[in-house]
Image (spheres, rainbow, N blue to C red):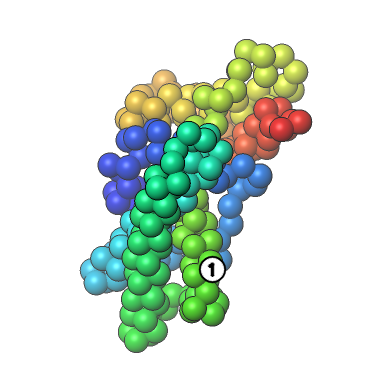
């Protein structure tokens, strides 16, 4: 469901690259069953609009934070005025995101929807908690896109020299998936056959293979960083 919301965003790989700066150490986890929220959108049009607003404002906030991180690391020549302007934009987006989360939470409580609100168990005046949640939500929504983007950072020929057979299959799987992702298309029959074959041989589904790839990325590419 969220793929519909973010289709026009994920077509811009530079956005994924910006967000990936916030996704270095481990796969993000969030205290929300996103699938149950997506299913509820199929039943409740009002909730769908509210959840879409949460996803969009969380996404925009995460991009603003990623821009600020990049600004602080790389853009040393920018003026203090430029920095303040970027920070004001982030703060305004932060306010919109907080409002969207509060409205959705109130709707869930008022309508007594069968959705877990455990993720909302923080002090509502804690802006930092809202910000952390928005980033985690965005990272979970974009998790597959971000992991696939990592393969572009790797020297595959060099990396393959010291991989075992299982790791090589993982790399091959991700290379195929990454090409499909980059082209923004459905897999052709030959690709689908290869993906299914590798998945069967590894005994893992796509999500677990991507997690295995990220472990390879951390071990081989981030070693010493």
Residues 209 and 147: in front is 147
Residue placed farthest to the front in the image?
80
Tell me if I can see residue 140 in this picture.
Answer: yes
Pick whichever, 187 or 140, lies toward us: 140
User: How many labels were placed on the picture?
Assistant: 1
For residue 202, above or below residue 85: above
Quarter of the image where the C terminus is located: top right
Location of residue 21 in the rendering, given as x and y in whole percent from the top left corner: 54, 41
Estimate the x, y position of residue 205 in percent, counting from the top left: 56, 41
- Work out which quarter of the rendered image holds the N terminus and state it: bottom left
Q: Is residue 95 left or right of residue 169?
A: left
Q: Is residue 169 above or below residue 75?
A: above
Determine the residue positioned at 34% across, 76% down.
Answer: 103
Tag 1's secondary structure?
helix
Residue drawn at point x = 43 percent, y = 65 percent? 36
Mark 1 neighbour density, 10 Å: few (under 14) some (14–19) many (20 or more): some
Q: Is residue 222 above or below residue 92?
A: above
Q: Position of residue 220 (x, y in %)?
A: 71, 27
Residue annotated with mark 1:
129
Q: Where 84 sits versus 190, above or below? A: below
Rendered residue at 58%/57% (across/down): 29
Whether residue 48 is visible here, answered yes or no, is no
């Amino acid at each position: 469901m969220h793929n519909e919301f973010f289709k026009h965003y994920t077509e811009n790989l530079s956005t994924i690259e910006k967000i990936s700066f916030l996704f270095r150490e481990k796969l993000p986890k969030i205290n929300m069953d996103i699938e149950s929220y997506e299913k509820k959108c199929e039943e409740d049009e009002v909730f769908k609009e509210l959840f879409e607003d949460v996803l969009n404002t969380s996404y925009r906030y995460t991009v603003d934070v990623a821009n600020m991180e990049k600004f602080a690391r790389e853009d040393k020549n920018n003026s203090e005025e430029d920095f303040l302007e970027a920070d004001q934009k982030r703060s305004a987006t932060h306010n919109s995101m907080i409002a969207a989360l509060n409205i959705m939470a109130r709707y869930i409580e008022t309508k007594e929807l069968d959705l877990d609100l455990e993720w909302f168990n923080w002090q509502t005046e804690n802006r930092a908690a809202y910000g952390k949640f928005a980033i985690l939500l965005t990272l979970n929504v974009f998790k597959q896109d971000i992991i696939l983007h990592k393969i572009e950072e790797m020297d595959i020929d060099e990396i393959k020299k010291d991989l075992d057979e299982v790791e090589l299959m993982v790399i091959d799987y991700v290379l195929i998936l990454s090409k499909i992702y980059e082209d923004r298309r459905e897999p052709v029959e030959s690709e689908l056959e290869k993906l299914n074959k590798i998945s069967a041989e590894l005994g893992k589904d796509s999500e677990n293979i991507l997690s295995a790839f990220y472990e390879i990325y951390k071990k081989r590419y981030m070693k010493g960083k």
